[in-house]
């Protein structure tokens, strides 16, 4: 642990987080770091205790569950085990949209924080969460990232999605100060092209990060360029892949290019970090002391991921289906942590979109850009030709000419003026045979060099 890392964790971060912002992130982090070493049965007992408390709260204070459970003839006291819990209905995004106000607990409406997400299904969703839940999510993120060496205050470079639109200069200034304090350098992966990959490598050499965190797609693309060009960059301690499943061949490519271990993480905007790999990389440890993660329909293979945030009493989402698939681990990890394992995350690879000038846009760009467009319910972007994109939009009455102009402007910024964008307002978008909506579909007849 270097000097700045020690000062940041022991002085600067406590002063900012606990003193200035009045958050309890560090207290929660200390508890989570202690609880991870509990025996598996103790973790399950702790999880069940927290779930019981949440269920009792939902039955008393959340209008949706009061009504829905009354219709089903269920009471919180009837749910005496996780098997009982698994009999409750799965919660879909459509159900949340249809009854959004009912999920807000009594007395919490004016105290919630909110986020929007496009998610891997391309259906924007606005959801609320409490300050305690936010602090706990941040603490769990620091714990999981720390397993891979990405500790707070450690020099870290993020190959990440940049801001959409034009943020206010004051906001940009504040973000630069914030990232500088956290010893972070942010590189916008949405601007990556064949022609400028060398500049990304130069930025890594200039910053000399101890850790690199990035979307898997851009990390793999940069790794391949480094190997193809015989270029070596300042060697980090670890590389963390996010936003997409990290396949074994991609891990190998990244490790050969950067000369260090690559780690897989799994999260979603709705709850932040769900699971991540420790130093042994035998699977992804599920944050079971913070979440309930179920795999619906999993026998010997993938199951549909269902999530319950155990600390979000303001807008509780019980057995929420986030649209992902994952496979449970059947091994034990030599690290000794009592947290259960996922062997892998399935079905999170979004097709990348290519442009004539060499750009390769990761599929995450489009949910990232479209999640806040007024009136947009669902979308799908298909590329059949290098210079043409087809965007199907399912809209409500709130979608107007300004919404369409925003979409055209932002897509042109990253895809270039040479790429035509055909927007179609449609009644529905067909699902894949697995029941999911592919957000981006690359249907080019042949790879483009």
Image (cartoon, rainbow, N blue to C red):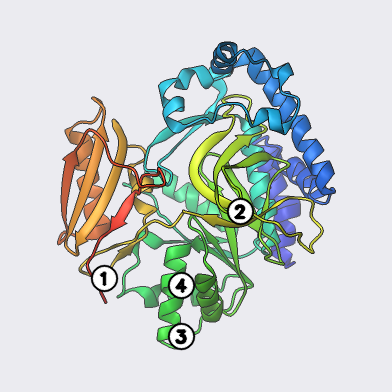
Q: Is residue 187 left or right of residue 261?
A: left
Q: What residue is at 58 percent from the left and 18 percent from the top? A: 65
Q: Is residue 158 visible?
A: no
Q: Residue 191, position in %: x, y?
A: 34, 63
Q: Nearer the viewer, mark 4 or mark 1?
A: 1
Q: Secondary structure at mark 1?
A: loop
For residue 300, the mark is: 2
Q: Nearer the viewer, mark 1 or mark 3?
A: 1
According to the image, label 3 marks what residue?
A: 231
Q: Residue 18, position in %: x, y?
A: 71, 39
Gap in angstroms between the C-alphas marked 4 and 3 = 13 Å
State the residue in front, 147 or 292: 292
59 to 37, vertically: above or below: above
Q: Residues within 10 Å of mark 3 (few under 14, many from 20)?
A: few
Q: Residue 415, position in %: x, y?
A: 24, 59
Gap in angstroms between the C-alphas marked 4 and 1 = 20 Å
Q: Earlier in the sequence, mark 3 or mark 2?
A: 3
Name the quarter where the N terminus is drawn.
bottom right
Q: Is residue 225 left or right of residue 234?
A: left
Q: Nearer the viewer, mark 3 or mark 2?
A: 2
Query: Image quarter for residue 307?
Result: top right
According to the image, label 1 marks what residue?
A: 358
State the residue in front, 377 or 78: 78
Gap in angstroms between the C-alphas marked 1 and 3 = 20 Å
128 to 362, vertically: above or below: above
Is label 4 in contact with label 1 (beta carbons under 8 Å)? no
Gap in angstroms between the C-alphas marked 2 and 1 = 41 Å
Query: Image quarter for residue 7?
Result: bottom right
């Amino acid at each position: 642990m270097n000097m700045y890392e020690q000062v940041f964790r022991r002085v600067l971060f406590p002063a900012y987080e606990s003193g200035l912002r009045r958050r309890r992130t560090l207290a929660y982090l200390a508890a989570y770091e202690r609880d991870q070493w509990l025996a598996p049965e103790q973790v399950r007992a702790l999880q069940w205790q927290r779930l019981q408390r949440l269920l009792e709260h939902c039955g008393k204070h959340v209008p949706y569950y009061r009504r829905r459970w009354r219709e089903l003839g269920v009471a919180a006291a009837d749910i005496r085990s996780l098997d009982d819990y698994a009999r409750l209905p799965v919660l879909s995004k459509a159900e949340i949209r249809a009854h959004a106000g009912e999920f807000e607990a009594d007395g919490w409406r004016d105290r919630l924080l909110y986020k929007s997400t496009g998610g891997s299904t391309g259906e924007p969703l606005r959801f609320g969460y409490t300050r305690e839940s936010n602090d706990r999510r941040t603490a769990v993120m620091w714990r999981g990232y720390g397993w891979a060496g990405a500790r707070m205050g450690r020099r870290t470079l993020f190959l990440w999605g940049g801001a959409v639109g034009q943020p206010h200069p004051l906001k940009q200034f504040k973000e630069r100060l914030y990232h500088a304090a956290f010893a972070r350098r942010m590189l916008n992966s949405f601007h990556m092209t064949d022609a400028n990959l060398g500049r990304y490598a130069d930025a890594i050499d200039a910053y000399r990060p101890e850790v690199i965190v990035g979307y898997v797609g851009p990390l793999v693309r940069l790794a391949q360029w480094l190997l193809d060009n015989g270029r070596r960059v300042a060697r980090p301690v670890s590389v963390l892949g996010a936003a997409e499943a990290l396949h074994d061949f991609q891990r190998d490519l990244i490790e050969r290019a950067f000369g260090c271990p690559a780690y897989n993480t799994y999260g979603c905007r709705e709850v932040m970090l769900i699971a991540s790999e420790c130093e042994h990389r035998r699977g992804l440890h599920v944050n079971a002391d913070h979440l309930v993660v179920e795999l619906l329909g999993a026998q010997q293979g993938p199951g549909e991921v269902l999530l319950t945030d155990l600390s979000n009493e303001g807008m509780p989402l019980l057995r929420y289906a986030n649209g992902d698939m994952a496979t449970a681990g059947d091994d034990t990890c030599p690290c000794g942590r009592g947290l259960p394992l996922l062997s892998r995350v399935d079905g999170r690879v979004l097709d990348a979109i290519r442009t004539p000038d060499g750009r390769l846009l990761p599929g995450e760009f489009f949910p990232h850009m479209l999640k806040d467009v007024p009136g947009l319910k669902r979308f799908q972007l298909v590329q059949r030709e290098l210079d043409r994109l087809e965007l199907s939009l399912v809209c409500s009455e709130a979608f107007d000419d300004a919404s369409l102009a925003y979409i055209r402007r932002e897509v042109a910024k990253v895809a270039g003026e040479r790429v035509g964008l055909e927007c179609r307002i449609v009644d529905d978008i067909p699902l894949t045979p697995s029941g999911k909506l592919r957000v981006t579909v690359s249907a080019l007849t042949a790879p483009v060099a």
